[in-house]
Amino acid sequence: MTMLIKVDPLKPAEDVLRKAADLIREGGVVAFPTETVYGLGADCFNISAVLKIFQIKKRPADNPLIVHICDREQLKDLIDQDYQKASTVMDTFWPGPVTLIFRKKPVVPKEVTGGLETVAVRMPSHPVAYKLLKLSGTPIAAPSANLSGRPSPTRAEHVIEDLYGLVDAIVDGGETPFGIESTIMDFSRERPILLRPGPATIEEIQKLIPNLEIPEFLLKKVNEPVRPLSPGMAYRHYAPEKPLILVINENRLDEILLKYPDAPVICPQEMITRFYGRRTIVLGTLKEPFTIAQNLFHVLRTVDSVATKVAIAVGFEPKGILFSVMNRLRKAASEIIE
């Protein structure tokens, strides 16, 4: 039986959250909110608990997990390198939605790192995640709290839909603020490299790290590495159950609409008048692009409740947070019209 634990997202009661922390310490698996998406967490040093995460999610064993910490002192237990060159990023974005990759210490189980000699670490800013980490007294390994391949969960109801009965507890802290997973950068090599775009945008990061390497697979349609170098790579993610057609080439939009006359269209508020007479699912507004990121995964789950065979999503100019949104839409799409 899965325990449901309701907490105030801003001021979670310690006595209530302690139930979840006790489960973590005892080798259990707990879903909890972060500022990005809900995570599915276990004690990162408990191999049997970590393996439960992979079994529950049906996650490939070579897909590494992110280790969550509540203070920089915990880095000493995890990484085997000087993190000075990442200090500017840490000072700016920690606690927050940025994951950094370093060379790992031998004590970090390879089950956590997908067999890699590096470990992905982040310090979440969400009050529930922070207090859970503090009460647990251990770094928590946690991927997103969904079945692998499904849209990431941004509400407790999404976690319940995918994982109720499979996990020990679900901590309900309401809707997550950012709505997409953390930005990931690799500092284990000579030159820092961006591996996953997220709420911390490329433009913001490049101001701090002018020599940041941005791989071609993030900029254009080329294959990602076969071996995942970080979470969110090499496997199809975020996909609704029904086919999703992503239309990037606006000149072909009318053609696709004609081909699928009953398909709902996922679009920003500013475009709904173009689709008069057709069902639209509004992502957010271009005036506040972070609303588009926040609603993205909820909308991708919503399309499965619409009684049609396919859905259509309109692409965005990949700038700022919308670069990260387009990264997720490309991974979710069954077909991309460019």
Image (cartoon, helix red, strand yellow):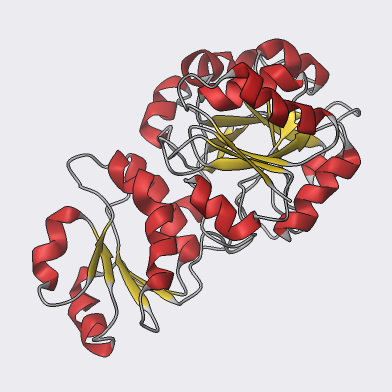
Q: Is 81 above or below relative to 121?
A: above
Residue 329: x percent and y percent?
A: 42, 60
> Is any atom of residue 123 visible in this view?
no
- The quadrant in which residue 246 appears is bottom left
- The residue under the point 41% across, 46% down is 324
State the residue in front, 151 or 97: 151
Q: Position of residue 298 (x, y in %)?
A: 41, 54
Q: How many marks can you see?
A: 0
Q: In which quadrant is the C terminus drawn?
A: bottom left
Q: Could you say where residue 221 lies in the image, as x and y percent from the top left?
A: 46, 63
**63, 87: nearer the viewer:** 63
Q: Does residue 209 appear to the left or right of 311 in the view shown?
A: right
Figure check: 206 above or below 242 = above
149 relative position to 141: left or right: left
Q: Is residue 143 above or below residue 119?
A: below
Q: Is residue 305 visible?
A: yes
Residue 90 placement, left or right of 112: left
Residue at 14%, 61% in the rendered image: 271
- Quarter assignment of residue 267: bottom left
For image coordinates 22% across by 81% down, the residue present is 257
In the rendered structure, the answer to whether residue 305 lies left or right of residue 128 reads left
Judge whether 287 appears above or below 225 on screen: above
Residue furthest out toward the bottom: 259
Viewer-nearest residue: 224 or 288? 288
Q: Position of residue 14 (x, y in %)?
A: 62, 17
